[in-house]
Amino acid sequence: MVILKNTTILFRPVGQKEMDLIAESGFRSFPPRLEGQPIFYPVMNEDYATHIAREWNTKDAASGFVGYVLRFAVYSDFLSEFEIQKVGSATALELWIPAERLKEFNENIVGEIEVISTHLP
């Protein structure tokens, strides 16, 4: 992955269904949120994404009992509109993107979404 100065690297833990939809997009965008999912939450570091993929996705039937960790770059100017949310430990850092802004978020992804690890039960 080429890292540009004006981008921020983010991570996202996903299960199989979301992974399939991302692959269908050519690894260029995330699918719309489901009803009852008001936010899209990319995470700020690989360790936290790996923890979720390994500890949650692999134990969840809705995730297909598999967890993927994705890495991608987003224009930093766009991300500056959103506060980093600490949701637990010092590494549990997320951005909360309102579901209605996911299309705009996707338009600010630079390059492809990359699979960096796969976790099985």
Image (cartoon, rainbow, N blue to C red):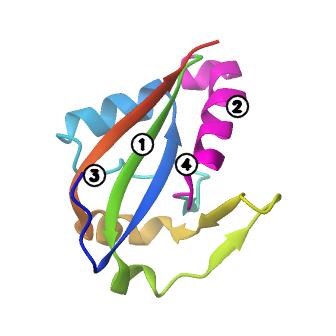
Q: Secondary structure at mark 2?
A: loop
Residue 12 shown left or right of residue 2 in the figure = right
Discs 2/1, front? 1
- Residue flagged by tag 3: what amino acid is it? Ser
Which of the two labelled residues, at mark 1 and mark 4, occupies the earlier sequence position? 4
Residue position for label 2: 56
| Residue type highlighted by circle 2 | Trp
User: Which of marks 3 and 2 precedes in the sequence?
Assistant: 3
The alpha-carbon separation of the residues under discs 1 and 4 comes to 9 Å
Asked if the residue at tag 3 contacts the one at tag 1, i.e. Cβ–Cβ closer than 8 Å, the answer is no
Q: Name which residue type carries label 4.
A: Glu
Marks 2/4 in contact by CB < 8 Å: the verdict is no
Identify the residue at horizontal 20%, vertical 42% (top origin).
Answer: 25
Q: Earlier in the sequence, mark 2 or mark 4?
A: 4
Which residues lie in the magenta part?
42-64
Question: Residues under labels 2 and 1: Cα distance?
Answer: 15 Å
Residue 57 at what x, y percent from top left?
Answer: 63, 28
Depth order, front residue of 67/89: 89
Q: How would you classify the magenta stretch by its main secondary structure?
A: helix
Name of the residue lying farthest toward the right: 88
Magenta span contains residue 45: yes
Residue that badge 3 annotates: 29
Which numbered circle lies on residue 70? 1
For marks 2 and 1 on the same chain, the one whose residue lies earlier in the sequence: 2
Marks 3 and 4 sit apart, C-alpha to C-alpha, by 19 Å
- Residue for badge 4: 46
- Distance, label 2 to label 3, CA atoms, is 23 Å
First of labels 3, 4 by sequence position: 3
- Residue drawn 45% across the image and 24% down it: 16
